[in-house]
Amino acid sequence: MRPVSGTVGQAEPVSGTVGQAEPPRVRAEAAEQEPGHRRWAGAILAAGMAVALAAAMISIPREHAALPAVARYALAVALPRWGLTEPVNEIVYGTRGFDTFGETFLLLAAVISVVMITRSREARRGYFGESQAGQREQAQADPVVETGATERAARAAEHREQGGHAPGDPAEPDTPDATALGTPAPETADAMTVVVRTAIRIALPVLAVAGLYLVAWGYSPGGGFPGGAVLVGVLLLVYAGFGRRRISRIVRPALLESIELAGAGAIIMTELLGLLLRGSFSANWLPLAAPRTILSGGIAQLFSASELIEVGTGLAIAVFALIGMGHDWAPDERAGADDPGGER
Amino acid sequence: MILVNYLAAVALLCIGLYAVLTKRNMIKMVMGLSLMEAATYLFMISLAYRAGSTAPVLLSPPPGKSAGDLVHGNVADPVLQNFCLTAVVIGVAVTAVFLSVVVRIAQHYRTLDSDKVRKMRG
Amino acid sequence: MTEAALTSLLPLPVAIPLAGAVTAPLLARLSARLPVIVSVAALTASAAVLLLAAPWVFGGRVIAGYLGHWTPVSGHVLGIAFAADPFGLLLALATAIIGVVLLLYSLSELGGLGPRELGGYACLFQLLLAAVIGAALTADLFNLFVWFEVAALSSYGLAGFFLERPMALEAAFKILVLTTLASFAVFIGAGLLYAETGALNFAQLHDSLARHLTTPDTVALGLLVAGFATKAGLVPFHGWLPDVHTTAPGPVNALFAGPMDGLGILAIGRIVFQVYPAGSTPVLGLLMTFGLVSALLGAIMALAQDDLKRLLAYDTISQVGIIVVGLSASNPAGVAGATYHLVNHALFKALLFLAAGAIVHRTGVTKLSEMGGLARHMPVITAAFLLGAVSIAGLPPFNGYVSLSLIHQGLEQNHDAAAYWLTLAAQVITIAALGRAAWLAFFRRRAGDYEWREQLRPGMLAGLGSLGACCIAFGVAGPALLRTLMAPAAAGLLQPGRYAAGVLSGSARLVTLHITFDYFSPAELVSVAASIVIAAVLGWRYLRIREPRVIGALRALHTGSANDYAAYAIAGTLVAIAVVSLA
């Protein structure tokens, strides 16, 4: 490993392997002069859009207008028909629950898309002409003739990050607390300093309970979406503070995916039972508990809890799929490309 | 004056739009789209505002009022808050897919410059 | 079955494929092909439920039900309405049935993929199909936006499917940028309409907008049209379409060209015909202009392409332009012809894209200049491609002839000579482009042999065969289908008052439209014959000459940069808003 020089932002060419003619990569990306025609075209179009939208904004009703009749109706049915003191929850999970139903599958589509884009190679049967076309196109797009020292070092670092061992690495300590004092912390440590870790240990239960609280008491503002987001934040906090190995038991793609799909399936069943039991899709079929209790709101509460499961696990899958993405989907199959960690 | 909010949302939208139309760095384009998303959230919530209103929550109404008073009184619009919630989820979902595509492009083409990633032309 | 029970079943065709999508990644762990088999079953069940409603609705009725029993209260609607009018039900049925065919085809062609890949593919495919069916059946603006977004997100994952082709990621990036801009436009438009009218339901919006239109209403119309036109693939919002089609798998191409473009066109039809009062804005003229430009630009660019799938993608833009031209004629013949062409386009474009995808899959060759002599090796695929090509050409007795004649009839009734001749010119250039492609790919002799050739599997034969049979059937049975399916669909679009009454009250009858169609009208037959002759000459000349400067200039405009395509889309949005608001 080359020692890091004192000044930041100055890239030094790799010694020995590249000639004088090749400019350092960092400097080439940093000088971004946008093409002239694009700048004034963009300015004119953005200004035109501003004028068009401002013309509309000036005429729409402002803060003294009356509330629309549908909004009054939503407020009026919240307590008597749903037993909820929170009209926004009643609209989102109850009266217009079908919109949220669609949104659940929107998030599912996004998570599956992220999983597909970040997937690693799998064995295939049969001949796929697209692979042949792809190899030709890849050779044109990325004509690296041989892997230099920089690329090898980068691949070794990624391999180590994924949990592999390059020859010559010291033995990994079992827990972050067992890391010896004085080790070069930022580059090789698995986790953060003891101050951060202690703070996280204290804050973690509070945050987790806060997330569950947001969902449980559906008659106060909250709901499945913010609850799911808080739980993902908790997971990320553990990952950032304690490192990958602590979280790898929970964040397994198979487990999280099953939970997420179970949540989505529960949402479909909740809405479908309305059709079977009450004659209309997304009708309320649970008896209404008294207002201001944890079960008030009928299927709105059930929907919100299933949404928590689906959103929390879905976002976790997406985030960890991005973090754990392999380097290259179709690694070099040519001779001379030594590749300790390119393919998982 | 809520008109200031509306015009601020339009301004933010157009700044984000300028970034999408002009910047070649893909991450900057994604940031421009995020800025446009934030502008739409501001727009929706500002539409929901009514002068001197309370939040549309029937739990623990302000002193001197009951839940029934709030239902017929001066309350902000809850339907638009549903819109905004949906838009936030859409924004998160699209940003996640966007960033995974950008990282893959960076791996394949080893550049974030959208002018260098244009094999398909014409 | 009572009408009330029928309307309560309408959300099922959306929920069943969603359930299939949820189980797909789990089933993939058991066996790679199981998710696709389950998805075929799910889409078949969906089509069955839709067929239950078909006799009622295609007899000239609009039926509507409110989810959760949240019915209108003195004309104000909070709940979400699901309404089956002939136009929406037709698109939903076509989507479900074509979805079954495409999934069976995927089982054969892509059955060798790894389990996780195939599970994800089945999941996203079903999500997109469910979203299109949901959008076709909904009568609520915000619900339409939600299904539009579900379709968009599924399309991103399917566009970047073959990761070994770097261009797939480039295409995924461009569709992301353009569709996200479109979704902002639709969202702000919906918000503006709600602020002005306090309404989300189409019927309530129709009644509220019947008075004088204000600036926010017209700006919202411009934004909504621009947003949905991006999904449909109209010029100048079309930047993503050719790139995405170049690299996607064959069945995904067919899915995008048929159902997904149909979603955009359906949404435009609903907003322009059933929500906004007729004649209050020059939006029909705007759509006619966009349609004619799309038709011509798509045809000309298709003539110049080297990549086979890219050629078909530009042809898709051209056909969508012709559909929108038919819609903008806004008389019974034109609108019925446009609806017919939408269904026909889904059929013959699926046939063409599946054939092209099969060529790429089997030989690994994508460019026309490297292909040749495939007629000897792959006779079935050659037959499928030629069948699709003659259908687009408008030859009787294939399906393109009926729908194009109806559109021409509609344009003649409006005495719109310019649009008529321009549409005819676009058709001639399209025939030339497809003829050139067929010659270069199938009949020309190739220097060497191909690297590898695979045999055709039974599922693929079934898929190509059924699509081809439909192309022939929809052509031969043209007048019958016009009377039973397309005329009610046109009635639904052209009678917005009855549609609105039906949505608010739960049921309404539409006035039957009688569209006279002369199958053997001499003018049409002569124009078809003349088109083919001129196209043959044009194609022959184009094979020999160098690229003309006009085409070179058009190709230079398509720079391939996402910034530039976004700029064209925003310019188109501004034009739409300006035309609709200032006139």
Image: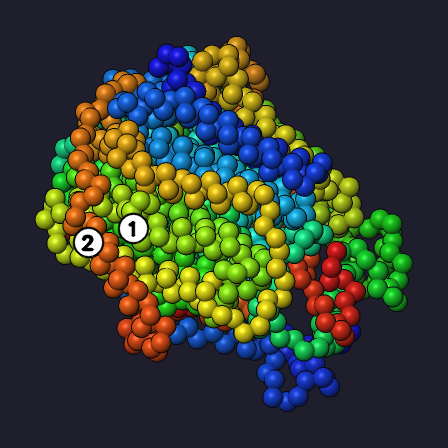
Residue neighbourhood size for the residue with mark 2, other residues' Cα within 10 Å, grouped as few (<14), some (14–19), many (≥20): few
Marks 1 & 2, CB-CB < 8 Å contact: no
Q: Is residue A341 above or below residue C223?
A: below
Image location (x, y in percent) of residue C388: 40, 51
Query: Would residue C464 be found to the left or right of residue A209 on screen?
Result: left
Quadrant where the C terminus of chain B sits is: bottom left
Estimate how packed mark 1 is, as few (under 14), some (14 to 19) or many (20 or more) residues with alpha carbons within 10 Å.
many
Chain ID at mark 2? C
Q: In the displayed structure, would residue C368 be above or below residue C153? A: below
Question: How did the renderer colour the structure?
Answer: rainbow
Which x, y percent locates residue C33? 65, 40
Residue holding disc 2: C526
Query: Left or right: where does residue B115 sit relative to residue B40?
Result: right
Left or right: C211 as drawn, with respect to C342: left
Q: Which of B15 and C87 is in front in this view?
A: C87
Residue at coordinates 41% horizontally, 25% vertically from top-left?
Answer: C51
**Residue C363 rendering spot, x and y as whole percentages:** 58, 61
| Tag of residue C394 | 1
Q: Is mark 2 on a helix, strand or loop?
A: helix
**Is any atom of residue C274 visible in this view?**
no
What is the quadrant of residue A163 in the picture? Answer: bottom right
Q: What residue type is labelled 2?
A: Val
Amino acid type indicated by mark 1 = Gly
Q: Do labels 1 and 2 share a chain?
A: yes
